[in-house]
């Protein structure tokens, strides 16, 4: 694979809506290392329509056939979480590299199975935790490593998404309201945000969590049908880091105005703040842009820090706002596939994040602190 382009088959492509069309396809098309050669959906009619719309050669209604096609090197799974186990397993069985959207699976047991299957297959895997590659977050991580903060004392996180504001929920998002589907506030907003925090400062050792359900129902799409909510939409997490610093996070959906994410890191010698910018910011840290502010002056004002070009690998004008961080992940994945590096998070890292969320759930049930792992 040293010279030819990486040939990609995407499972879950709708030409008119969906994350694949809004993020993955623009991201892949912005990078010369990739070529989209196949698309797949649950019906051959819709698969052919998507292939024609995006100018892709092959269309499939069978995920195994897509994965086994000789012109597919990397399978990308962008469908609803309950289908991840079956579709990722098919790709691994075909011996193909796999990029799966986060969450990796519906349960931690399913995620464990996929990690084991990937090891047996001997392929490379990637999990869609693209917030790690926001240039502002990368710069903050390097500054922390270089001692900008001194001794870290605290990390304070607030993330309020616009999703769920108002009385109506789009039809495509209704499945996220059912806790059994593992695609609610804790799993998606919580997973992406907490992963970004851990990428900055290290993994939490233990946590205390509270989960609350603010909204009880929504009107479905443009109809008068009311759909019940069983998934928590308010998440509180407190925890400690290996060096003794404390982390506190409030993550929730349904914010009607001013939605976005803010992460404040306070140390003995300085302060850094990451905050959402741009039109995609209300969708969560993994989607929106971030700016970085900092100060090392005692009693000083925070000021925005310039971002070196070295952190940027894709052209946002080509990826669009939602596809930007996805493109940054794809750029690094291409490098990993070329040289065997380990730049992007794999399924094993996704499994560790599943276990962190399990600890939050256990704590919410027990009322006490829970160890992660």
Image (cartoon, rainbow, N blue to C red):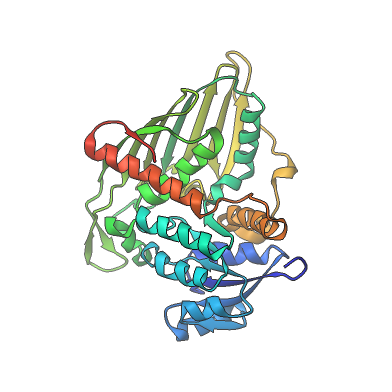
State whether residue 345 is above or below residue 206. below
Q: Position of residue 303 (x, y in %)?
A: 63, 27
Instruction: Name the side, left or right, on which 364 lies relative to 25.
Output: left
The residue at 66%/54% (across/down) is: 332
The residue at 55%/78% (across/down) is: 68
Q: Is the C terminus in the top left, top right, bottom left or bottom right quadrant?
A: top left
Work out whether residue 14 or residue 267 is closer to the camera in this orientation and state it.
267
Extreme-right residue of the structure: 3
State whether residue 195 is above or below residue 13. above
Q: Is the N terminus in the top left, top right, bottom left or bottom right quadrant?
A: bottom right
The residue at 50%/34% (across/down) is: 263
Residue 178 visible in the snapshot:
no
Residue 104 visible in the snapshot:
yes
Extreme-front residue of the structure: 120
Q: Position of residue 64 (x, y in %)?
A: 48, 78
State whether residue 97 is above or below residue 250. below
Work out whether residue 356 or residue 228 is closer to the camera in this orientation and state it.
356
Instruction: Name the side, left or right, on which 217 lies relative to 154.
Output: left
């Amino acid at each position: 694979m040293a010279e030819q382009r990486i040939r990609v088959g995407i499972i879950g492509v709708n030409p008119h809506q969906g994350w694949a069309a809004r993020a993955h396809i623009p991201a892949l098309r912005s990078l010369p290392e990739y070529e989209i050669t196949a698309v797949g959906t649950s019906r051959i009619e819709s698969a052919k329509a998507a292939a024609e719309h995006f100018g892709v050669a092959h269309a499939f209604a069978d995920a195994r056939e897509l994965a086994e096609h000789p012109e597919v090197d990397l399978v990308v799974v962008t469908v609803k979480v309950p289908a991840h186990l079956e579709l990722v397993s098919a790709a691994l069985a075909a011996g193909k590299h796999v990029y799966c959207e986060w969450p990796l699976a519906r349960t931690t047991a399913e995620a464990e199975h996929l990690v084991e299957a990937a090891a047996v297959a001997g392929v490379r895997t990637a999990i869609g935790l693209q917030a790690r590659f926001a240039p502002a977050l990368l710069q903050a991580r390097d500054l922390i490593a270089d001692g900008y903060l001194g001794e870290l004392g605290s990390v304070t996180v607030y993330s309020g998404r616009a999703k769920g504001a108002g009385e109506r929920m789009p039809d495509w998002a209704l499945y996220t309201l059912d806790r059994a589907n593992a695609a609610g506030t804790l799993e998606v907003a919580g997973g992406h945000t907490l992963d970004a925090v851990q990428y900055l400062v290290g993994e939490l050792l233990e946590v205390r969590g509270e989960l609350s359900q603010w909204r009880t129902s929504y009107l479905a799409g443009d109809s008068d049908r009311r759909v019940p909510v069983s998934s928590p939409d308010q998440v509180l997490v407190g925890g400690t880091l290996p060096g003794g610093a404390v982390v506190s996070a409030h993550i929730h959906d349904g914010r009607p105005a001013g939605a976005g994410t803010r992460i404040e890191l306070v140390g003995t010698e300085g302060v850094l703040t990451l905050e959402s910018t741009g039109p995609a910011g209300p969708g969560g840290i993994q989607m929106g842009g971030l700016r970085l502010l900092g100060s090392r002056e005692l009693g000083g004002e925070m000021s925005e820090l310039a971002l070196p070009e070295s952190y940027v690998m894709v052209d946002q004008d080509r990826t669009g706002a939602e596809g930007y961080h996805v493109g940054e992940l794809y750029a690094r994945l291409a490098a990993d596939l070329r040289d065997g590096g380990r730049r992007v998070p794999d399924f094993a890292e996704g499994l560790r994040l599943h276990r962190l969320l399990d600890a939050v759930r256990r704590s919410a049930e027990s009322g006490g602190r829970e160890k992660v792992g």
